[in-house]
Amino acid sequence: MYGIGTVADLKLKDLRYLTALAETRHFGRAAERCFVSQPTLSAQLRKLEEYLGVQLVERRPRHVGLTEAGAAIAERARRIEEMSAEIMALAQSWRDPLAGALKVALLPTVGPYLLPHVVMRIRKALPRMELMLYEYQTEPMLEKLEQGELDMGILALPVSGPGEALATRLLYEEPFMLAVPEGHRLGGRAHARIADLEGETLLLLEDGHCLRDQALSVCARAGVHERADFRATSIETLRQMVAAGVGVTLLPALATQGGYGSAKGVVVLPFQKPAPLRRIGAVWRKSSARLALIAAVCEQLARGSGLAGAR
């Protein structure tokens, strides 16, 4: 028999159990996510149902689902979790604006090449901060930002329809470089021109990567044709395919430095000025309680990249 509880009976951890179950649709996985045993999670959810006076979970063999009431309450519970996290972050920012955890996501075409330049710099400048790094493409990154699962994203600008809730800042402008196989007709030149790409086979990343769209935009006026039967999942796959003589590609400048700049079988050429480039920036929620820390990290990212841009 369900009863009706009071607001004081609602506990944040019980709401967290419900949102975990809503996302996983599995008692065992939800319990693992919440770091409790499965019987504990199940029992607490039954207590929550008693407090609220409604059934939240449909329990059937090999199937877990939420009732209509359970789904609606789980959505509101997720918002309460987000606000709770904001409260904790706000308190932390008042105690020490440059301390605490900061969840930062980077594009797969940015993170591996930018982070070696900036991580030690950030740690030295912000020793009381715990930098938590993630990797997402643009669309899921923006979704997680808006949902409060991330504090900041590093991605290519401009952001399409970021909404009034998000703010952006330019960090640096990154030129594109042309990567060709060894022995290619352009390999001996000091610089490449967009017009030189006419008739070449262009290798690109798969759909979903903004780098693909940027490369297509650069090459649209040069008569370049994309290899239709191949789309790479990463810059490193592109680099290996160029080395194999399959075609040419455009690489961001940071992806041609250090160990990446000496890839066997690949020749990298800068473009004549004005070189095509991409603009890399930060995005965050305007309502974030970590604005001081976000600004400090942005400063280190902009300076550490070694590229021109906003300072």
Image: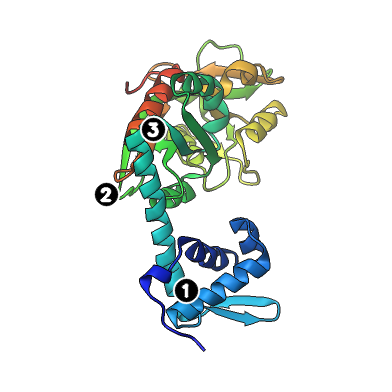
Q: Which residue is mark 1?
A: 71
Q: Which residue is mark 2?
A: 164
Three-letter amino acid code of the residue under disc 2:
Glu
Question: Residue 121 appears at what percent x and percent y?
Answer: 49, 19
Would residue 69 appear left or right of 226 to someone viewing this image? Answer: left
SS category of the residue bearing label 3: strand
Q: Residue at x 52, y 89 (%)?
A: 1
Q: Residue at x 43, y 39 (%)?
A: 153
Question: Residue 179 appears at what percent x and percent y?
Answer: 59, 24
Q: Which residue is mark 3?
A: 281
Residue 42 shows in the view: yes
The residues tagged by marks 2 and 1 sit, at their Cα atoms, a distance apart of 27 Å
- Circle nearer the N terminus (2, 1): 1
The residues tagged by marks 3 and 2 sit, at their Cα atoms, a distance apart of 17 Å
Question: In front: 129, or 63?
Answer: 129
Q: Is residue 60 above or below residue 212?
A: below
Question: Residue 295 appears at what percent x and percent y?
Answer: 34, 30
From this viewpoint, which residue is outermost toward the left? 164
Question: In front: 205, or 74?
Answer: 74
Three-letter amino acid code of the residue under disc 3:
Gly
